[in-house]
Image (spheres, rainbow, N blue to C red):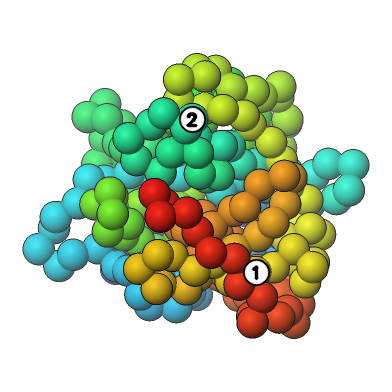
Amino acid sequence: MTRGTRDETGTTVGAREGGGPAVTTDGLPGWLDPVVEAARSVQPGQLSRFLPPEDGRGRQSAVLVLFGEGSRGPELLLMERAGTLRSHAGQPSFPGGALDPEDGDPHTTGPLRAALREAEEETGLDPSGVQLFGVLPRLYIPVSEFVVTPVLGWWRDPSPVGAVDLAETARVFTVPVADLTDPEHRVMTVHPSGHLGPGFTVESALVWGFTAGVIDRILHFAGWERPWDRSRQVPLDWRA
């Protein structure tokens, strides 16, 4: 039996039992139902105006959008990239990275394997405790030319996490969804180019860019978003 969810072209993404990572909604906590429904119905243009080039350019990659449940309820796993990296230095992000050849087909199970593999390499996460339950449409990061597949996961059996390689990861942390939806933690970031985007001031960090955009859209389409002041702006450093 194939378990999966569609990508932005309507293709089912998943794996046959015993053949690799599977995407299944069996046994998820009820509070994730709105996220499951959003993943099934959201269209690429509803997530971002930056979509993969039609000519196929861009490096295929994946991130793990991992939901867990902590002492304050639902939470998301994030990491802060090392300040010495060439791209997105010092920026909070989801665990993830480029697909390796051994990850397989980027249009089927490749992003699933890559998201879990990168999360393990960067945070020490035990992939066996993660249940993948959805895949969002592929998006594009123009500055690094990454074509990114956000893979949704439920941290069914939490494992210890932390920065595995300080040359790549400064820290690993979780953020309660309650803080992400709190209007006091919502801002608009202003890039030196003039581009405006959503941001979150949480856990002594400013979450912005691609990661904040994905979180913002998940909160919106899951019906978790609360009214907030979009006139509250935070300028980004010129090196952003």
Q: How many marks?
A: 2
Task: Return the residue found at the far front.
Answer: 238
Circles 1 and 2 in contact, beta carbons < 8 Å: no
Label 1 environment density (alpha carbons within 10 Å; few <14, some 14–19, many ≥20): many
Q: Element under label 1?
A: strand
Q: Mark 1 points at which residue?
A: 187
Residue at the limit of the structure toward the left, as seen here: 55
The answer to which image quadrant residue 177 occupies is bottom right
Residue 69 seen in this snapshot: yes
Please state the horizontal and vertical placement of residue 132, each as a whole percent of the image. 55, 44
Under circle 2, the secondary element is loop
Q: What residue type is labelled 2?
A: Ala
Q: Residues within 10 Å of mark 2 (few under 14, many from 20)?
A: many
Quarter residue 131 falls in: top right
Which residue is disc 2 drawn over?
82
**Front residue of 55 and 164:** 164
Residue drawn at x 59%, y 66% is 234
Tell me if residue 37 can be seen: no
Question: Relative to 219, is 42 on the left or the right?
Answer: left
Q: What residue type is labelled 1?
A: Val
73 vs 164: above or below: below
Picture residue at 83% right of the left edge, 41% below the top: 70
Give the camera-side residue of 156 and 203: 203
179 vs 25, nearest the viewer: 179
Image location of residue 69, percent across then percent down: 80, 44
- In the rendering, at what x and y percent does residue 17 appear? 46, 36
Q: How far is mark 1 from mark 2, CA to CA? A: 23 Å
Q: Position of residue 106 (x, y in %)?
A: 27, 45
Q: Residue at x 13, y 58 (%)?
A: 56
